[in-house]
Image: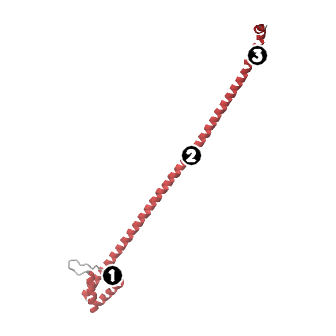
Amino acid sequence: MKLEKRSSGADQTPAAAPQETAPKGKKPVVVYIMILFIVAFLLMALSFVMHQRSNSEVLGELQDSVSAMQEIQDTQDQILDLQQQLSDAEKNQEELESQLADTQKSADDAQLKADALLALYTLQQQYSAGDYDACRRTLQNMTEQGLQDYLPTDSVNDVTSPAQRFEQLNEAVLNH
């Protein structure tokens, strides 16, 4: 009898009915899960797009910052170059001022030498003319100005040097 129950068709019909209802019950769950996956995917895509936009904005700001820093660096380099040029110009100015001072001193010495030679020439002319009072005044002026120190001491072609000639004239006027 046990065999008969198993093979009877009445027992199989109720078992088949739950199998048919089970696939119908699983189908809405699968659709629900698919909708959840689609929504999750859309949310992830939206998040990705928002993240990309945020990254683009931050990247733009970083590029602006880098550009600003490069401009600052270029400006600082220009400042350093200008400071170096200024330093070079100041050194050049100091050298030129030193050269000017040397040239001015040489010019002053040359002028004093010319004045001394002119005074010696005047003294010789006054002595040759026999004007001893004028000779004394010229000697006094030369001594007060220190012009006798600027007379050349070297002689050329066995000619008496201007400094020696001054001493000779000075002795001659004082003895006269």
Q: Residue 168's quadrant in the figure?
A: bottom left
Image depth: mark 3 or mark 2 in front: 3
Picture layout, residue 41 above or below residue 71? above
Q: Which residue was labeled with disc 1?
A: 147
Q: Is residue 147 left or right of residue 87?
A: left
Three-letter amino acid code of the residue under disc 3:
Pro
> On residue 18, which mark appears?
3
> Residue lying furthest left in this view?
158
Q: Quadrant of the C terminus?
A: bottom left
> Real-space Cα distance between discs 3 and 2?
69 Å
Q: Residue 44's quadrant in the figure?
A: top right
Q: Residues within 10 Å of mark 2 (few under 14, many from 20)?
A: few
Instruction: Give how far across and how far down residue 20 sits, in percent.
Output: 74, 15
> Real-space Cα distance between discs 1 and 2?
76 Å
For mark 1, give the secondary structure: helix
Instruction: Give how far across and how far down residue 93 sits, in percent.
Output: 42, 65
> On residue 50, which mark appears?
none
Residue 35 in view (yes/no): yes
Instruction: Give how far across and how far down residue 154 sits, in percent.
Output: 25, 78
Q: Is residue 85 left or right of residue 41?
A: left
For mark 3, give the secondary structure: helix
Q: Please report the residue visible at 54 percent of the width from the left and 50 percent of the height from the top.
A: 69
Three-letter amino acid code of the residue under disc 1:
Leu
For mark 2, give the secondary structure: helix
Q: Which residue was labeled with disc 2?
A: 64
Q: Please report the residue visible at 27 percent of the width from the left and 92 percent of the height from the top.
A: 175
Three-letter amino acid code of the residue under disc 2:
Asp
Q: Residues within 10 Å of mark 1 (few under 14, many from 20)?
A: many
> Camera-side residue: 157 or 19?
19
> Residue lying furthest bottom in this view?
176
Picture layout, residue 55 above or below residue 137? above
